[in-house]
Amino acid sequence: MEYTVWNSIFGYSLMKPWFFTEFTFLAVFGVFLIIYSFLEDGSKARSWYLILFSLFFYYKSSGPFIAFFLFMIICDFWFAKAIQNLRGAAKNLILFLSVAISLSFLLYFKYIDFFVLNINSLFGTKFNSYNLFLPIGISFYTFQSISYLVDVYRGELKASENFRDYAFYMTFFPHLVAGPIVRAKDFLPQIHNSVILQGRYFGEGMLKITVGLLKKLLIADYLGKFVDMVHGDPQGFSGVEHIVSMYAYTFQIYFDFSGYSDIAIGLALLLGYRLKENFDLPYLATNITEFWRKWHISLSHWLRDYIYIPLGGSKKGPVKTYIFLMTTMLIGGFWHGADWRFVFWGFAHGLALAIHKLWQRYFSGILNNFWGRFFGLFLTFQFVSLCWIFFRANSFNSAFLSITKMFFNMKRSAFYGFVSARPEFSFVFLVAAIIVFSPNHYRFRIYSKIVGFPIWSWLIIFLVALQVIVQFKDDVVPPFIYFQF
């Protein structure tokens, strides 16, 4: 009995990492928060308490791989100090070495099998695959590590004076495993200025967490069941079912990832820290450039600031600008996964961004009215939805089969049959569409009223939301989609 309790608390499972959506996490976090609130604001004790809990959270998700994470943090701390104090070639060398070390873990764990597979395919070799476990969050904290080192190199940020501050920034558990990608210059200044559980922070935090849980467990996961079914046997479904699956996944990935981001932002608010929003109504974008200003904002800003602009941005002529856009998005696609499907997805978005730049250069005044913007929104949404097929499909063959069925095996009358045969799914799908396409001013009006509710009412709202989730969620909750990246 004692072993069982001990193992449930301090054990870990690489196959079943600890999620924000697990009620055990919410219960443990509640106890943690009570103790946290009694510790002095800005004190070393509170900082170390949060660091240790964050490391415990990561350990519950990745077990022994926490050692690599700690090694990276220690290296970054000292490398940043050296970069700040050195000049010339020595400074450049240390930056190169520090970034190489940060990338080495990501390249090894995430891409080694991809390289082995392609080398075997190209040269007829028979190297064995490694089948490595991908440490949770490695893509996100690697990019955070690189942004910190480069910002110190550029003189945009001073290296942390003490190890505790940098460890606090890197290990802060709300954003640790799936973003948003937090920049040190945005977060480090908050470390000694946090304010715990003041009215609006608490209300806003509880609202974010509640909405995030509902997005993930009631909408994303429900839509995902149908998407999984279609992509599990693409040959066995009609064109109508494939097109519904395409839009369902478009909504699923938004509600899944924005739900995670909402929970992360809400947890941070309860701790007294503010993370930047990661989504801004992306499916209301009227062009692909605007979409990338609204979708996964922390990643798009990272790609812009650390790849696109250093390459030359838009300052080296139109042709090179298009090449830089393509390069940036290819890297962004490859960051998402070690598969040519993700590279193709990045290529398609890079090409679309280049075409939009070209359009702006020669036809910027055309369609600059209500109907032009409506057409732009419609076209952008269709393009983004179509590209998501390559993101979700199990292979290129499966993706092209799905697209082929959508275009050549679709009867409009079948839509009515689908709706009548799946009324619950159709209802959730409709709710998702209404939420996604609702204008921002309606949301802001509702949000500003709800967030001001008294603290005691939020505890009731949260418990009611949990009860609703318990009634309707599946017994097995799938991981957040971006955990695999």
Image: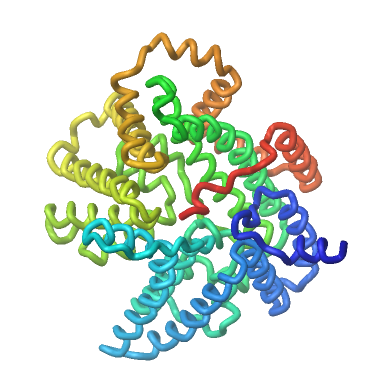
Q: Is residue 264 above or below residue 162?
A: above
- Quarter of the rendering occupied by the N terminus: bottom right
Q: Residue 247, percent across and down?
A: 43, 30
x 54%, y 21%: residue:
426
x 59%, y 41%: residue:
216
Q: Nearer the viewer, residue 233 or 327?
A: 233
Q: Which of 463 and 117 is in front in this view?
A: 117
Q: In this view, does 267 lie above or below 477?
A: below
x 69%, y 68%: residue:
53
Outermost residue, right side: 1
Position of 39 compared to 70: left or right? right
Q: Residue 399, percent across and down?
A: 34, 36
Position of 55 compared to 127: left or right? right
Q: Nearer the viewer, residue 303 or 280?
A: 303
Q: Residue 244, percent across and down?
A: 44, 25
Position of 207 compared to 76: left or right? right
Position of 87 compared to 37: left or right? left
Q: Is residue 404 above or below residue 97?
A: above
* Residue 126: quarter of image: bottom left
Way the structure is coloured:
rainbow
Outermost residue, top side: 413
Q: In this view, does 173 lie above or below 441?
A: below
Figure label count: 0
Q: Residue 411, percent across and down?
A: 36, 12
